[in-house]
Each structure stands twice: as structure tokens, then as C-alpha cells.
């Protein structure tokens, strides 16, 4: 109530001050034509006195009197015109208080429509607590998926070959429940078909079969969170948040989990936390990281809402990575020849898995895809190699030299 009393008092004072200034200006503003009229009247009286004293002859006095009278008439006409204009201005005084009162009324009406008149002042700590309460009560993953399914989305292009492959994978995995590679492939291909719910289910099975502390297990869990977010239409649900937090508990620098954690904070009304997460992630990311562009598109707005306005050009630049390829190469494959069969198989499997995971999450060059295709062929995983080959052909369609590199990799595959 005190706020309304103070606001009303200040508004009344402002109106009175403006009216006082306007009326004073109207009172003190005497037209210059009035002074001219008075001067000419004084001159006529002076001429009569000069004629009576004999200073001027009757003829000279008459000629002077005629000229002064003519000027008096012109000055009087000008004075009448000025007074008429002044009357219009004075009548306009009625519009000033009316306009001020209308402005005040409009302000009160607008605030009553979009404001919260009875909302008490809330300290920052209480606001944060309220935000956290709302965030804890946000929709679940299942609710978000139902809502997303109702919304229209662009249709994916038909891909009969991929659909047939996924159908075969579903049949195979119904019998091979303990095959992590199969579940990973099924999840990835369900995702390519836009079957987000099925992709999440397959990825959950894949994650459950892995060592949760291994590199592959950590990244698989981060990918699971990403699939859940895609299934929810880009929304980070409490369940997806739990997967992200579990990922970061084992790998605090995981880029995928950090990006989506920042997105969750941005969605949940904590742009301050989102800005801190994304800014540090930018400073530690390579130029090929898939989250760079999404962060750069959003971080200026997030920084503004966080109270730290900043230009995207002032943010940390990506770390330059050396140009050499990463992953299994000919020298590393040759070095494996001196190992036992078990050690060699484990080493190659790990290198291939790391390369495949990086290409799936960060992308890479056509040469790196060719390396992966060749390695999978050597390991006898020809179907998987051909699947990667098809993906690479789509990714690098139209790029100079890419077809030649991929054709060479395909030619090296066992028939």
C-alpha cells in the first residue's frame, strides 16, 4: 500500500508542477505589440503638448499626428491578432491536465493488466529458491515425450535400406540381449530414422551392458542423455538431468554433458549458471566440437539475462588441434602384431571404439572415416563398415576428393 500512496503522491506533484510552469508562462508572456501601442499613444500626447507650447506649428503637428495615428492603428491590429492567438493557447491549457491524467490512468491500467500489484518484494535468495522449486516440479520425461509427439515435426526422407537394416537389427537384438555393439548400432540407427523413443530404449540397454566407469560407458551415458533430450523436443527433463549428473560425476569434463547441463540451466531460469558452464566449455573445446555453434547462437542472450552482457567475439576461442589424424593408423596396427592375440584384439577394439565414438559425437574428416571403415573391415565387421561408409557418403556428398577416398576404403573391404 505504501508503494501506491507514494506513486500517487509523486504523480500529483508532477502534474501540479507542470501546470504551474505553464500558467506562469501564460501570465508573464505580454505581447510586444502592446508596448508599441502604448508608445504611439504617448507620442500623440507629446505632440499635443508640443503644439500647445508652440514648439510645433499646427501644420507640422497635424502631419506628425497623422503618421503616428497610422502606426498606432497597425500596432493595434497586430495586438488584436496576438491576443486572439493567446486565447487559443490559454484554451489549450485544458488539454494539459487532461493529457496528464489520461497518461496516469493508462499507466495504472497497463500495470493492472500485466503487473502484479500485490506481489511482495523478493530478495535474490528467495527468487533463486523459487526458481529451484519450479525446476524441481517441471514436467517429467514421459510427459515431455507425449507433448512432443503431439507437435508436428518435419518428415524425414525415405530410406528403405536403413529401415530394412533397422528391422533386421531389431529381430537380431531380440535374441542377442547381451551384445553391446548391437544395441549401440540399433540406438544410433533408430535415431537416424527419427524413432527417438526406440533409440532411448536401445541406448539404455547398451549403457547397462558397459562398465559405467570406462570411457565408452561414460560417453554412452552422455549420448543417452542427448537422445532423451531429442525425444523430449529439446527439453531437459529431470530424468535427463539425472543422467547428465551421473555422467559428470564420472567425467567432469565431458563436453556433451556440460553443454546440455548449461541448456538445462538456461531453460530453468538460471542463466547465470548456464553462462558459467558454457563459457568454460568454450575455453576448453576444439574447433570441431559439435556444441560450439549451438552455444555461440545462444550465449549472448544468456549472458545478457545473467547480467553479464558480452559479445560472442569476446568469448574464448576454440583450441586449435593439430592437423594429424587421430585413431588407428597403419603403424599402430603393425605394432599390434607383436602382441598376444587377446591383447592385440583388445587394443584394436579399443582404438576402433574410440575413433567411432569421436566421429559419432564430434564428426571428423573423410580420411578418418576411411580409417574407421578399413579397420572395421580388417576386424571382420563388414556390415558395420558398410554402414559407416554409407553415412560418410551422405556427409561428404559433393566434397572434392571425398568420393575417391571412400571408394578406396570400400575396395579394401572383404567381399
Image (cartoon, grey):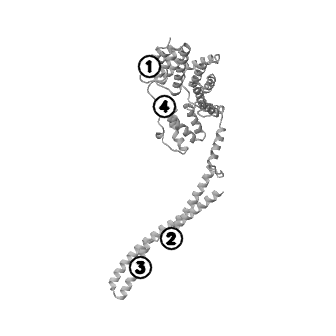
Q: Which residue is mark 2?
A: 27
Label 3: element kind: helix
Looking at this view, name the residue that lies furthest to the bottom: 53
SS class, disc 1: helix
Mark 3 or mark 4: whose residue is earlier in sequence: 3
Q: Disc 1 or disc 4, which is closer to the eye?
A: 4
Task: Give the quadrant of residue 264.
Answer: top right
What is the x, y in percent for residue 26? 50, 68
Residue at the spot of label 3: 41
Position above or below: 132 against 203: below
| 3D distance between C-alphas at marks 4 and 2 | 74 Å
Find out whether the residues at labels 1 and 4 contact each other: C-beta distance under 8 Å: no
Q: How far separated are the C-alphas under marks 3 and 1?
A: 108 Å
Q: What is the spatial separation of the Cα atoms under label 2 and label 1, in whole angstroms?
A: 92 Å
Bin the neighbour count of mark 2 within 10 Å (Cα to Cα): few under 14, some 14-19, many 20 and up.
few
- The circle drawn on residue 286 is 4
Label 4 element class: loop
> Residue 169 placed where, x, y %?
60, 18
Q: Upstream in the sequence, badge 4 or badge 2?
A: 2
Amino acid at each position: 500500500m505504501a508503494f501506491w500512496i507514494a506513486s500517487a503522491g509523486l504523480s500529483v506533484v508532477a502534474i501540479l508542477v507542470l501546470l504551474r510552469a505553464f500558467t506562469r508562462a501564460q501570465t508573464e508572456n505580454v505581447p510586444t505589440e502592446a508596448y508599441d501601442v502604448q508608445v504611439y499613444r504617448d507620442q500623440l500626447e507629446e505632440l499635443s503638448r508640443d503644439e500647445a507650447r508652440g514648439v510645433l506649428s499646427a501644420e507640422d503637428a497635424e502631419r506628425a499626428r497623422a503618421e503616428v495615428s497610422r502606426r498606432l492603428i497597425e500596432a493595434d491590429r497586430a495586438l488584436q491578432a496576438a491576443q486572439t492567438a493567446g486565447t487559443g493557447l490559454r484554451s489549450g491549457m485544458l488539454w494539459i491536465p487532461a493529457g496528464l491524467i489520461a497518461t496516469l490512468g493508462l499507466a495504472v491500467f497497463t500495470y493492472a493488466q500485466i503487473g502484479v500489484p500485490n506481489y511482495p518484494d523478493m530478495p535474490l535468495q528467495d527468487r533463486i529458491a523459487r526458481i529451484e522449486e519450479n525446476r524441481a516440479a517441471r514436467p517429467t520425461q514421459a510427459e515431455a515425450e507425449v507433448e512432443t509427439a503431439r507437435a508436428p515435426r518435419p518428415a524425414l526422407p525415405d530410406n528403405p535400406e536403413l529401415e530394412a537394416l533397422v528391422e533386421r537389427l531389431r529381430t537380431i537384438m531380440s535374441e542377442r540381449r547381451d551384445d553391446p555393439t548391437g544395441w549401440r548400432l540399433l540406438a544410433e540407427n533408430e535415431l537416424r530414422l527419427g524413432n527417438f523413443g526406440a533409440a532411448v530404449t536401445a541406448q539404455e540397454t547398451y549403457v547397462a551392458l558397459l562398465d559405467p566407469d570406462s570411457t565408452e560407458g561414460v560417453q554412452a551415458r552422455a549420448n543417452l542423455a542427448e537422445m532423451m533430450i531429442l525425444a523430449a523436443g529439446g527439453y531437459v527433463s529431470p530424468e535427463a538431468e539425472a543422467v547428465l549428473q551421473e555422467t559428470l560425476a564420472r567425467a567432469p569434463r565431458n563436453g556433451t554433458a556440460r553443454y546440455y547441463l548449461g541448456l538445462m540451466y538456461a531453460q530453468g531460469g538460471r542463466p547465470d549458471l548456464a553462462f558459467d558452464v558454457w563459457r568454460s566449455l568454450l575455453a576448453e573445446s576444439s574447433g570441431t566440437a559439435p556444441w560450439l555453434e549451438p552455444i555461440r547462437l545462444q550465449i549472448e542472450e544468456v549472458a545478457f539475462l545473467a547480467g553479464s552482457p558480452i559479445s560472442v567475439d569476446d568469448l574464448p576461442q576454440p583450441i586449435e588441434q593439430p592437423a594429424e589424424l587421430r585413431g588407428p593408423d597403419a603403424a599402430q596396427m603393425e605394432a599390434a602384431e607383436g602382441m598376444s592375440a587377446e591383447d592385440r584384439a583388445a587394443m584394436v577394439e579399443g582404438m576402433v571404439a574410440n575413433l567411432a565414438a569421436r566421429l559419432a559425437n564430434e564428426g571428423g574428416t573423410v580420411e578418418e572415416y576411411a580409417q574407421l571403415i578399413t579397420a572395421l573391415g580388417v576386424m571382420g565387421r563388414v556390415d558395420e563398415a558398410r554402414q559407416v561408409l554409407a553415412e560418410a557418403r551422405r556427409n561428404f556428398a559433393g566434397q572434392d576428393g571425398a568420393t575417391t577416398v571412400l571408394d578406396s576404403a570400400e575396395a579394401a573391404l572383404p567381399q
